[in-house]
Amino acid sequence: MGTSHQKGQTMRRSTGLLLVSVLGVSATACGSSEPATPAPGGAKAVTITVACQPAKSAPKERKAWDDDVATFMKAHPGVTVKSTDQQPCFDPKTFGPKLAGGQMETVFVVPVTNYADVIAQGQALDITQYTSSIKNWNDLRPDVRELVTKDGKVYGVPNVHYSVGLVYNRALFTKAGLDPDSPPKTWAEVREAAKKIAGLGQGYVGYGEYSGGNTGGWHFTQAIYGRGGSILTPDNKQAAFNSPEGKAVLQNLHDMRWVDNSMGNKLLVGWESLMMAMGSGKVGMMLGAPDVVTDVVNKFKGNVDDYGITGFPEAKASLSGGEAFMINPKATPEEAKAGLEWIDFRFNTVGKGRFDFARGKANGNPVGVPDNDVYGASPTGKAIQEDRVKNASLPVDHYQPYVEAAATIPPKAEPVHAQELYAILDVAMSGVLSREDAGIDELLADAETKANAMLAAKG
């Protein structure tokens, strides 16, 4: 996965309404804040800093954020909120130095791949006693809450959760005589559909897949998780992908590429190459999270009405990603409580803050893609989805198969040392997609050897 896509996984999963502008701005700029209303009854005034203010280059989103800050402060006398607009919100290169130098915000964001490290190193406050500040806390998905919990103690508020599904071109399904309202549920059905789409003529690709730029290994990981396999052993010390499930992933791709001839003959290396192909309207299917639809339409000029999302075929698990808000371990009890109340208001209230879909639609944001499932099928989750549908600017019924499937498929996080592992697995993906006589056993054995050497070196 290239850097733009890596940001994509950790940050862009935030819906258009979380308003994280992915700009390479490393300086931390403080947003202005109005003076706080005096605290009632002589209570102690408190100032908190909060991460993820939209950049100045997104003026409507920034105004929405600043309006929310003003509304929150009015409702919380004595609390002053100062915003920082570093983008992306989480930068692994600056995270450690910011924390060590006392520059970390009271409320900061961490991607799921970094939860364990941040918690283990004492870089996040134990917020167990404050979770009641999140009024919908018990509606958050238990499996997602589990990710921010260690030894029974809670260290974060899950903010974004997504899982991978199958993105498909409904217009091509119709053109190939397939029913776009009955997308494939099995790999056998994926193969059949891909053959029919490839049969439309020259330049049509039934199923698109990556072979490099770390995106090949990333999609291999998605596919092996779906089949019930793993990338690493439970202790993260050894590779586990040279397995029946890993062989099935490569064999399926080999057969679609060389037996069915349904994958085209052009190797798609990095993230952008497949997204461009999808946007061109000539690719039938690809693995991806719902934000693929947003990107294909916004960045690669795809027709918004053409794309649907369904559940991952035969999924025993699905690669998931996301992020959580955590609290600076140096925060006072008053700061921690105010920080949690801000998170509750801006990020966890139906119809408010990032879930103010009516405002998002008025601002021209794409509304309707179900790319955040922290609340699942709980009453809060249902209310958010109803509001999203009511204010949608995208065809939400095209995404319903994904919504229904995602609620039932267990999430599985990316492996540790993900980028290094993906680079190693790129070679296996590239091998099987570029050479008809590539030996699958040999490709996986070579990757296993390299992965184990890398893991040993990492200790």
Image: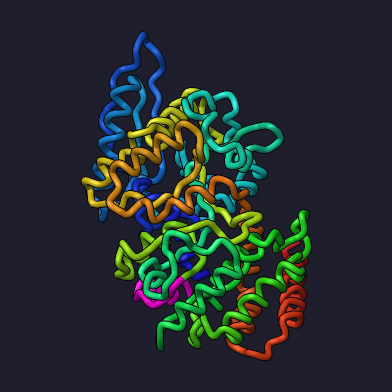
- Picture coordinates of residue 189 (x, y %)? 56, 68
In this picture, residue 66 sits left or right of residue 266: left
Q: Which residues are magenta?
A: 270-284
In this image, 363 relative to 332: left or right? left
Q: Residue at x 45, y 83 (%)?
A: 199
Say if 131 sits above or below 388 in the image: above
156 displayed left or right of 47: right
Of residues 56 and 412, the one nearer the viewer is: 412
Provide the major secondary structure of the magenta segment.
helix
Residue 161 image point, x, y percent: 51, 47
Nearest to the observer: residue 445 or residue 237: 445
Residue 306: quarter of image:
bottom left
Residue 48 in view of the camera: no
Residue at 60 percent of width and 86 percent of height = 258
Along the viewing direction, whichever of 48 and 132 lies nearer the viewer:
132
Q: Is residue 399 magenta?
A: no
Please tell me in which quadrant of the rendered image residue 293 appears.
Answer: bottom left
Please indicate, yes or no, whether residue 231 appears anywhere in the rendered image.
Answer: yes
Q: Residue at x 46, y 81 (%)?
A: 198
Give the total number of marks visible in the rendering. Answer: 0
**Which residue is depicted at the point 66% across and 58% down?**
416
The x and y percentages for residue 383 are 40, 34
Residue 283 belongs to magenta span = yes
Quadrant showing the C terminus: bottom right
Q: Is residue 215 above or below residue 85?
A: below
The x and y percentages for residue 397 are 37, 52
- In the image, residue 284 above or below residue 20: below
Colour pattern: rainbow
